[in-house]
Image (cartoon, rainbow, N blue to C red):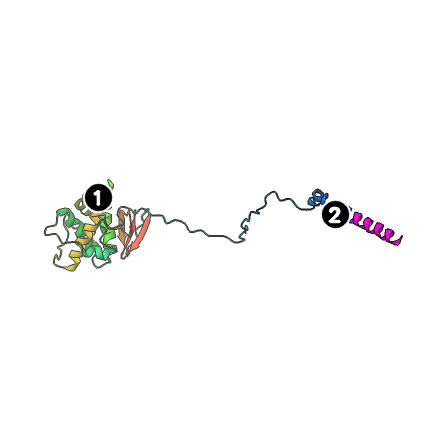
């Protein structure tokens, strides 16, 4: 009798185990509901975005500025005005026009800097080209009551073997050709610093012993 009961108990236990196994296999769909579903299995990594809380200065492109017509050495051989002056050849014969221009530079600005001499020379060139004064250098220089060194239609004699004259001729050539800028660009008038005329003109600059206007 006992063995039958034990056998029945064993059979019942086996049935219980079998039922549990069958129940676990049938619950696969429900278990899958607990697993997250990824619409994009491979996550895309994006760089982090950061913000600056201070000004950011960007470098600007270099802009080439156009030079005025009389601002540079036309041949590009000189870096300074003294260098350009030293490159000028002394002509065997000066035209009357260049003699008038060089003479005015010599008597007005002899002993001044090259910039001062050039500024004086450019005034004469500017006047000749302006349409408001005589159209030649000699006409400008000998116009009545314009230059104190002029007496009638003549100027004093020049020491043509001097360094001052050779320098004045070189500056006259540069001024006439517009090969270097004037410190008083566009000037049409000047006076010595020792006088103070009441001119209603636009003052441009003082260069050495002269004040320039237009």
Mark 1 and mark 2: Cα distance apart in space = 119 Å
The residue that disc 2 covers is 21
Q: Which residue is drawn at 14% across and 59% down?
A: 162
Question: Which sits earlier in the primary sequence, circle 1 or circle 2?
Answer: 2
Circle 1: element type: helix
Which residues lie in the magenta part?
1-16
Residue 34 image offset from top left, x and y in percent? 70, 46
Residue 122 image offset from top left, x and y in percent? 24, 49
Residue 129 image offset from top left, x and y in percent? 23, 42
The residue that disc 1 covers is 128
In the image, taking residue 15 as reference, residue 96 lies left or right, namely left
> Magenta segment: does it hold 11?
yes
Say which of marks 1 and 2 sits in front: 2
Q: Nearer the viewer, residue 6 or 149?
A: 6
Count of numbered labels shown in the rendering: 2
Cβ atoms at labels 1 and 2 below 8 Å apart: no
> Magenta segment: does it hold 19?
no
Q: Residue at x 22, y 46 (%)?
A: 125
Q: Work out which residue is located at the far right of the displayed protein and give it.
A: 1
Q: Nearer the viewer, residue 111 or 16?
A: 16
Counting other residues with Cα less than 10 Å from the Cα at mark 1, is it few (<14), some (14-19), or many (20 or more)?
many
Q: Work out which residue is located at the far left of the displayed protein and give it.
A: 92
């Amino acid at each position: 009798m006992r063995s039958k009961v034990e056998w029945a108990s064993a059979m019942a236990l086996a049935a219980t185990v079998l039922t549990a196994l069958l129940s676990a296999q049938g619950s696969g769909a429900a278990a899958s509901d607990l697993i997250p579903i990824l619409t994009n299995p491979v996550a895309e990594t994006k760089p982090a975005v950061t913000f600056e809380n201070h000004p950011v200065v960007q470098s600007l492109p270099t802009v080439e500025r156009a030079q005025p017509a009389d601002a540079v050495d036309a041949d590009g051989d000189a870096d300074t005005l003294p260098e350009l002056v030293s490159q000028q050849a002394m002509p065997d014969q000066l035209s009357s026009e260049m003699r008038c221009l060089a003479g005015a530079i010599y008597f007005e600005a002899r002993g001044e800097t090259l910039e001062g001499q050039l500024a004086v020379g450019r005034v004469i060139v500017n006047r000749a080209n302006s349409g408001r004064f005589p159209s030649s250098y000699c006409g400008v220089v000998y116009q009545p009551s314009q230059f104190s060194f002029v007496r009638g239609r003549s100027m004093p004699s020049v020491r043509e073997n001097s360094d001052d004259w050779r320098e004045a001729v070189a500056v006259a050539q540069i001024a006439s050709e517009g090969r270097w800028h004037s410190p008083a660009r566009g000037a049409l008038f000047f006076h010595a610093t020792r006088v103070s005329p009441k001119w209603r003109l636009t003052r441009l600059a003082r260069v050495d012993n002269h004040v320039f206007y237009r």
